[in-house]
Amino acid sequence: MTNTLSQQIQEHFSALSKSERALANFLLTNPDCLMVESAASLASKVGVSAMTVSRFIRKIGFIDHSEAKNSVKKEVFGTVLPDAGGFEQRYELYGHSDESDKWSSENLELEIAAIRQVHELRRSAHWQRCVELLASADAVYLASYQVIRHIAIGFSAQLECVRPRVCYLDGLDGTYGQLFTDPAAHKTIVVIDTYPYTIQAEKLAVQAVEAGLDLVVICDEFCHWAREISDNVLSVTTNTGMVFRSKAAMSILTNLLTNDIISSLGDSSAKHMEIVTKAEDRFGQTTKETTIKKSQNTQPLSFE
């Protein structure tokens, strides 16, 4: 199928029912929603049934929601990059082959499209659900692995500044005892995972759900296990034509989440940040005042 989503809708518009036309009008205005919303969440957003969404997808020429989603993804991201797996394959394709210059020249557009996707995801119902879980939990834990672990460490550091009881799990004890023995009544764990997907990430997610914890998964577009375990999944595009998959969109996602958590917590977050700031000053952890004073007293260089 080579037509765009808009063309497919317009071509079949006359055959649509009243509720299907409402859905069509929504998607003509917000086509990216089809890429980030499930059939159920899209139905809720438009005010129709999930069955109407499925029927609409078939009427405009797609086999199912998955095919329609992939079609929109191709529209948004332009070039469909080969899903090279490991480092060796990605080096051959993006860092060594005759095609590497082509992928590099398109990287900026692909990165921008991935960031745009995150901002569209921010408007979804399950984004707000994730914000609520991370704001209202008595304790928040985060875990991630391999080359992506810095995202969880950075996200954890940000959350520590805006709310109490945040902990990054390095998994070195082999049992995640701190998480499962914590007596907090309401615990939320964030698991961040990307290709090639660690065994630990999936196992931890399964155990957390079985223990009654709320689970949020932040992952890439190819993650095979996340949606089987949790409804609270935020997935972003990482395949933008580099040897190492891009983490730019994922970093922006965690920053936007932090900002929305601050807004959700309101005054309690403001008071928490005030305490953190005073502690920084008390222990001399930042150089902001020293830097300002130095800049005020520094005279411009003269070469006369």
Image (cartoon, grey):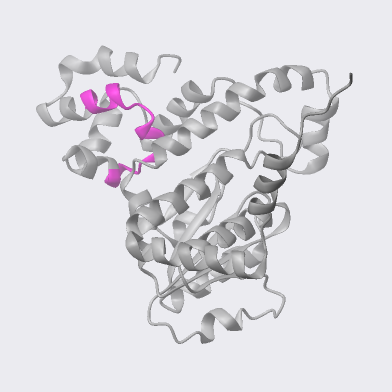
Residue 11 to residue 285: above or below: above
Please tell me which residue is depicted at 58% across the width and 64% down the height of the picture.
202
Asked where in the image residue 237 lies, by quadrant, the reply is top right
Please tell me which residue is depicted at 82% across the width and 34% down the height of the picture.
91
Residue 299 to residue 132: above or below: above
Nearer the observer, 104 or 161:
161
Q: Magenta stretch?
A: 24-41
Q: Main secondary structure of the magenta part?
A: helix
Q: How many marks?
A: 0
Residue 295 to residue 28: above or below: below
Q: Residue furthest front?
A: 304
Instruction: Based on the picture, tell me whether residue 48 belongs to the magenta stretch.
Output: no
Q: Residue furthest left?
A: 18
Instruction: Based on the picture, tell me whether residue 31 belongs to the magenta stretch.
Output: yes
Position of the C terminus by quadrant: top right
Please tell me which residue is depicted at 68% across the width and 51% down the height of the picture.
196
Asked if residue 177 can be seen in this view, the reply is yes
Picture coordinates of residue 165, whole percent (x, y): 49, 74
Picture coordinates of residue 116, whole percent (x, y): 47, 31
Asked where in the image residue 132 lies, by quadrant, the reply is bottom left
Q: Is residue 224 left or right of residue 85?
A: left
Q: Is residue 71 left or right of residue 16?
A: right
Asked if residue 222 can be seen in this view, the reply is no
Picture coordinates of residue 45, whole percent (x, y): 23, 41
Q: Is residue 122 left or right of residue 222?
A: left
Position of the N terminus by quadrant: top left
Picture coordinates of residue 200, whole percent (x, y): 64, 67
